[in-house]
Image (tube, rainbow, N blue to C red):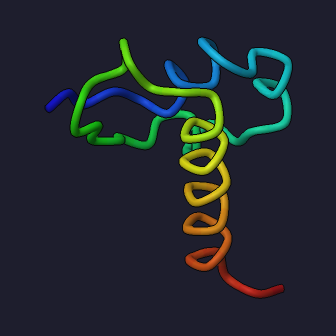
Amino acid sequence: METVKLSQIVMKWFPDMMPFLKHNELNSLIVLRDGLGILEQNDAMEIIQYSICEHQSSAPLQ
């Protein structure tokens, strides 16, 4: 198992998304069962999408 920041996943697979993610999203800790080295692109996108949804669900409504 390996713990990484979401920013590491984004930088590896989708660096063009960096400006669109919030600082707290990028600093989210993600635990990867098999490590970053074998993470596939589709799995990376799923992790990014889930993380964004998690942060949106905890955001206060204005």
Give the quadrant of residue 51.
bottom right
Of residues 32 and 27, the one drawn nearer to the viewer in this rendering: 32
Residue shown at 76% from the left, 87% from the top = 61
Q: Quadrant of residue 5?
A: top left
Return the x and y of residue 38 as percentages of the image width and height. Answer: 38, 19
Q: Is residue 4 above or below residue 37?
A: below
- Relative to 49, is 29 above or below? above
What residue is at 56 percent from the left and 77 percent from the top?
58
Side of 35 relative to 47 (left or right): left
Q: Quadrant of residue 31?
A: top left
* Quarter of the rendering occupied by the C terminus: bottom right
* Rendered location of residue 15, percent (x, y): 75, 15
As drawn, the residue found furthest toward the left would be 1
Q: Is residue 22 left or right of residue 47?
A: right
**11 shown above or below 17:** above
User: Residue at coordinates 67% horizontally, 82% vertically from top-left?
Assistant: 60
Residue at image location 63% in from the left, 24% down from the top: 10
Q: Where is residue 24 drawn, in percent x and y? A: 55, 44
Q: Is residue 53 above or below residue 62?
A: above
x and y percentages locating residue 50 in the rendered image: 58, 60
> Dividing the image into 4 quarters, which one contains the N terminus?
top left
Q: Is residue 41 left or right of residue 5?
A: right
Q: Which of 60/27 is in front?
A: 27
User: As drawn, which residue projects farthest toward the bottom?
Assistant: 61
On the picture, is 24 further left or further right than 3? right
